[in-house]
Structures are given as C-alpha cells and as structure tokens.
Amino acid sequence: MSLKKQALSSVKWTFIQQLGTQGIGLIISIVLARLLLPEEFGLIAMITVFIGIGNTLLNAGLGSSLIRSQDLDEEDYSAVFYFNLIVSIAVYAITYFAAPYIAKFYEQDILTALVRWLTLSLIINAFAIIQTTRLTKIMDFKTQAIVAIPSLVIGGSVGVIMAYLHYGVWSLIAYNLIKNLTNTIQLWFYSKWQPLLKFNMEKFKQHFHFGYKLTLSGLLDTVFNNVYAIVIGKFFPVSDVGYYQRAKTLQMYPVGTLSAIMGKVTYPLFAQIQDDNVRLKSVYKKILQMNIFLLAPTLMIAGVLAEPLFRFLFTDRWLPAVPYFQIILVTGILYPIHSFNLNILNVKGRSDLFLKLEIIKKTIVTISIIIGLHYGIYGLLWSAVVISFLAFFINTHYSG
C-alpha cells in the first residue's frame, strides 16, 4: 500500500474512532451533567492530574521511541511492557499513601478514597499500552476503533446507571475504571500479542535514552495542562472547578477530536518520511492547513452560540461555565499547530530540544498564573490565552 493510501485509510478509521468515541462521550457527558452536580465533577477534576502523570510515565517517551524506531523485535516490546507494568504499580503505591495529603491540600476528605480508586486505572492501562503502540506503528487504526467504541459504551452505561441511582461522584469513578478495563481486555483479544518472559536491558536502555526526555516533557505538560484545575480547586469553590472542567471538556470535543485524528496518524506518517525534508514539509503544510480550515470556524460559531448551547445541553445550572468556555475557545485554534510542530521535533529525534522548549514554556506559564491569580479566575483564564500565543511562536520557530 502506498504512503498516501495508507494515510487515507488511517485517517478514515481514526476519524471513525474519534467521531464515535467523542460523539458517545458527549452523550454520556450530557446525561451525567444532568444527573450530577458541578461540585462532583469538580472533585474528579482536582485529581485528574494524578492519572495524567501516571499515564505520561507509562506512555509518553518509550511508546514514541518504539513507533519511530525502524528495526524492532519482540524483545523491544517486552522490555517496555515490563517497565510500564513496574512503573504503574509504583505510581499507584505512591498515590495510595499520598491520598490523605492530597485530600488535606484541597480540604476535601472524600478525595482520599477517590484517589485510591481512580488511580487503579493506571495498572489497568499498563497492560494495554504496548498493544496500542504496536497497532499505531503499523497504522492499524481499524482495530483501535473496534476496541474503543464498545469500551466507552459499556463504561458510560455503568456510570449513567449509577448516577441515576444516586451514587454521585462514584459513578464517575466506575465509568473510568470499567471503560479502561473493557478496553484492555479487548486489546489483548484482538492484538494477539503477548510479552516474552525476558527483559533485555540493552533494548530497554536504547528506548529509554530517547524516551526519558519526552517523558519529562510529558510530565511538565501534564502538570501544567491541569494546573488551572489545581489552582482553581485550591483558591476557589469546588463548583468553579466543575464549571471550568465542563467548559474545557466541551472545548476539547472539536479540538481534541481533530487533533487526535491527525496526531495519531501524522506521527507514524512523519516517522516514515523523517529523512526527506522536502516531502515532510509538504505533507506537514497540507495537514496543518486542513486542520485550521476545519477548526477555526467551528470554534468561533461555538463561542457565539455558547449560552443557548449550554442551556440546551446541560440545563441552566451550568450557565456560569459559559464565559469560561468562550475564553478558552481562543486557545483551541492554536492547539493543532502546537501538536504538529512538536511531532516534527520528535520524528527528527530532537527529544532534547523538545524538553528544553517545555521547560521554557512552563516557566512562562508559572509566571503568568502568578500574575493572573491576582485578577481572579478570569485573570487565570486570560493568562492561558496569552501563554498559547507565546507557545505558538516558540514551537514554530524551533521546528522551522
């Protein structure tokens, strides 16, 4: 199959997966938002950062190394699989014992139990990462779509039923755990891959040398992607965290769908032509133009119709989230540009530069948050817009 046909097939199946999961996810989110309170979503938003950190440690660097490497055997995959499993158990143990301190930080006692249950998903996910990586490397997005959609339906159904039966925030915990468990079981069934009973240290070192810089970059990115929820949760009412998270989640439906489709396809695609700069530049330019052409008008329309959209989807109880939503929509227009520029650095093997740029940008984020906090929650949100534009200039300059 030619590169063009392979890319088109991959885009088609990734589009089906993303459209299916995002569409079903939106329906589930709407139903849950009508059954649960903003405060209950806020509690989950406060601890999402820990799941993000764990998943970054498992997947950000070594998975990317496997995808970009040209010559692999079963020992490569097995070494990374066992490392991921060990890391997931270690991270769970740390968060288990840290849970009371997390609850004390936010002054919410219930977070102790919530953290301990929700972070179980890290161990579940560790069993699925290599299967997903192998499918991504060969650009088999059809199987990933077949797996992802039923997992979401099953997990979402459990969550909605529990919410209807007044289990409150625990319905959100069950939703996540059941979805991840179903996803992992299906991946083992469809991928037919099993690890060797062997750990090759040399293979591991090879991938770790490339991957650890991306992992550190990913950790910074994960923490700072969630830093607004952390800061809002610490200094503002829990309901404000829920409103912010609802606005951010709705914004990410169009942004995340398109970026995930193109991001999943473009990284292995760019990796195949990484040594042909002329071709790489041409493909990159076409993909980026298509993204902006689709995304910018969608977000602008959503901003104009924000109030009736929230009232129709989530009822009047969520209307305080409307101005949050309208502000952070601006950052969504630049989101795919950030993603593709950083993909270029990765396929070129410049994980060192990737890490340096993340450190620079996160330093700017920290300063902006400190300044924005003096102007309340709206100051924080507008600081995110400023940061997004600064990151745009930094990323595009270094990727060339």
Image (spheres, rainbow, N blue to C red):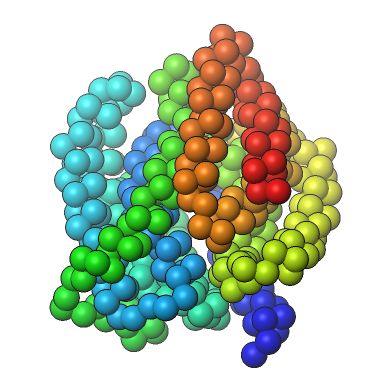
Q: Is residue 385 above or below residue 5?
A: above
Name the outermost residue toward the top: 374
- What residue sits 16% from the left and 37% below the top? 97
- Residue 339 placement (x, y as % from top left): 62, 51
- Residue 303 placement (x, y as % from top left): 77, 38
In this view of the protein, which residue sits in the foreground, 320 or 188? Answer: 188
- Left or right? Give the position of 12 relative to 203: right
Q: Quadrant of residue 391?
A: top right
In this view of the protein, which residue sits in the foreground, 25 or 216? Answer: 216
- Residue 277 placement (x, y as % from top left): 70, 64
Name the outermost residue toward the bottom: 1
- What residue sits 52% from the left and 44% below the top? 353
Q: Is residue 111 above or below residue 334?
A: above
- What residue sits 38% from the left and 83% below the top? 191
Looking at the image, can residue 174 be seen?
no
Q: Quadrant of the N terminus?
A: bottom right
The total number of labels drawn is 0
In this view of the protein, which residue sits in the foreground, 395 or 308? Answer: 395
- Residue 227 placement (x, y as % from top left): 47, 30
Q: Quadrant of residue 100?
A: top left
Q: Is residue 354 above or below residue 148?
A: above
- What residue sits 35% from the left and 55% below the top? 209
- Left or right? Give the position of 202 relative to 387: left
Looking at the image, can residue 350 be seen?
yes
